[in-house]
Image: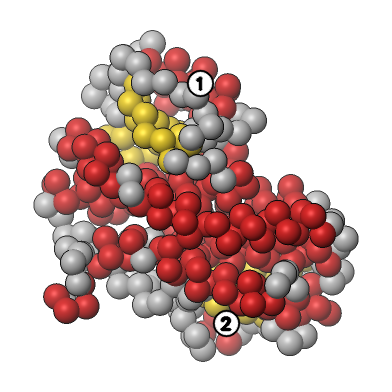
């Protein structure tokens, strides 16, 4: 393993650092193609995607959070409704199916039992427009789907998913733009803008990785804690969920994520000086609202750890620590903000001495119920 690890201590750390390359590889087909088009998803994709009336996403774990993020893009950019379900819930629910909705499964391994069974159930309800976003070629779920987009993260060994997540997001953004274009919702200028954002993404992710020393400084303060709260709004709420999941999976610190607007409806009761609060707060239309959520936490003595971006004019103050990603990247911002929360979890786990690549009780691929 030491040969494969190179300069890294764990596969998770290596995989976090591989993300600029993994993302570049995953968008290569789009760049070679010079734009978004149905063929990126398979030969007969045009006929499958052309007249869909909505999108139903099915997944588990981190892949589910990729789906939750994609809903913001799909509804905003394509104008189609999008539902996102946890596969193990969907498969046992009486679902009202519209066969004109595209069923999108997201799975790193392509072998997760619940996701596979949810797909079979969707098909039994009449869904025949099925698309798999997967990292493992020829695995079970893409084989059972009509269309597929392979993320090109490369083998992911760490149980906690990192590069699979960000490449899933890239694939989902590509799908969003492709559907929007087919529906006449994306003009040439918008398409060029989105392509340009994708082209710059590996560089923006690399800039976020360069924050590692600052994040290590924070993680020492997290390591002794028993609990942490993660907050985000809008398309960054799923990144808060993913940050909390990463922290609990590998450091065993109990972490919960809330949409920041829900603070007053419960979690504020937990806030005291012993509860670190991580906020994902890039400069977007919700920033002012997030700032007022931060005041609510500060007023209760909570220590804040804020991830924001270059544009946000967010200052450090008593009890408010700020790490800034160097670029504001607009609609792809959730992908860039996934990096610091991965690094925070990794370094907190390192400080606690847990088995980062093989956390207790967890498996990389869950092929049983
Ligand atoms: C397990 C893994 C997670 C993963 C989830 C879904 O819980 O530990 O990292 O997100 O399964 O796996 P999949 O392969 O379907 O994406």
Label 2 CB, ligand 1: below 8 Å?
no
Residue 26 horizontal/vertical position (percent)? 53, 72
Q: Is residue 178 above or below residue 285?
A: below
Mark sitting on residue 142: 2
Q: Is residue 215 above or below residue 269?
A: below
Residue 236 horizontal/vertical position (percent)? 53, 42
**In the shown orientation, is residue 38 left or right of residue 199?**
right
Helix, strand or loop for disc 1: helix
- At x 29%, y 54%, the residue is 249
- At x 33%, y 61%, the residue is 17
* Quadrant position of residue 359: bottom left
71 or 187, nearer to the observer: 187
Query: Where's the C terminus, which quadrant?
Result: bottom left
Residue 64 horizontal/vertical position (percent)? 52, 58
Disc 1 versus disc 2: distance between alpha carbons?
Answer: 42 Å
Q: Is residue 242 above or below residue 87?
A: above
- At x 28%, y 65%, the residue is 14
Mark sitting on residue 291: 1
State which mark lies toward you, 1 or 2: 1
Query: Where's the N terminus, which quadrant?
Result: bottom left
């Amino acid at each position: 393993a030491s040969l494969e690890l190179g300069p890294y201590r764990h596969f998770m750390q290596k995989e976090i650092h591989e993300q600029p390359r993994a993302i570049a590889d995953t968008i290569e087909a789009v760049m070679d193609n010079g734009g978004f088009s149905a063929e990126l998803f398979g030969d007969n994709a045009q006929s499958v995607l052309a007249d869909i009336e909505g999108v139903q996403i099915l997944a588990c774990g981190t892949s589910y959070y990729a789906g939750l993020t994609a809903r913001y893009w799909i509804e905003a950019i394509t104008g189609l409704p999008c539902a996102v379900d946890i596969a193990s819930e969907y498969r046992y629910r009486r679902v009202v199916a519209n066969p004109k909705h595209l069923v999108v499964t997201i799975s790193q391994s392509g072998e997760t039992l619940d996701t596979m069974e949810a797909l079979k159930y969707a098909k039994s309800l009449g869904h025949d427009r099925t698309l798999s976003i997967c990292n493992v070629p020829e695995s079970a779920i893409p084989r059972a789907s009509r269309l597929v987009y392979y993320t090109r993260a490369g083998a992911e060994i760490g149980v906690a998913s990192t590069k699979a997540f960000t490449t899933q997001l890239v694939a989902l953004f590509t799908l969003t733009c492709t559907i929007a274009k087919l529906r006449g919702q994306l003009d040439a200028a918008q398409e060029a803008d989105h392509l340009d954002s994708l082209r710059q993404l590996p560089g923006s992710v690399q800039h976020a990785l360069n924050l590692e020393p600052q994040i290590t400084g924070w993680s020492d303060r997290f390591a002794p804690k028993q609990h942490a709260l993660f907050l985000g709004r809008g398309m960054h709420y799923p990144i808060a969920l993913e940050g909390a999941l990463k922290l609990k999976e590998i450091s065993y610190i109990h972490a919960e994520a809330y949409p920041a607007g829900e603070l007053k409806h419960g979690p504020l009761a937990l806030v005291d000086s012993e509860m670190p609060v991580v906020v994902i707060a890039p400069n977007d239309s919700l920033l002012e609202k997030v700032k007022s959520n931060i005041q609510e936490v500060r007023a209760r003595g909570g220590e804040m750890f804020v991830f924001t971006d270059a544009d946000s004019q967010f200052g450090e103050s008593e009890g408010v620590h700020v790490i800034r990603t160097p670029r504001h990247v607009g609609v792809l911002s959730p992908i860039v903000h996934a990096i610091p929360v991965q690094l925070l979890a990794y370094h907190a786990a390192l400080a606690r001495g847990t088995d980062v690549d093989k956390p207790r009780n967890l498996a990389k691929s869950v092929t049983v119920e």
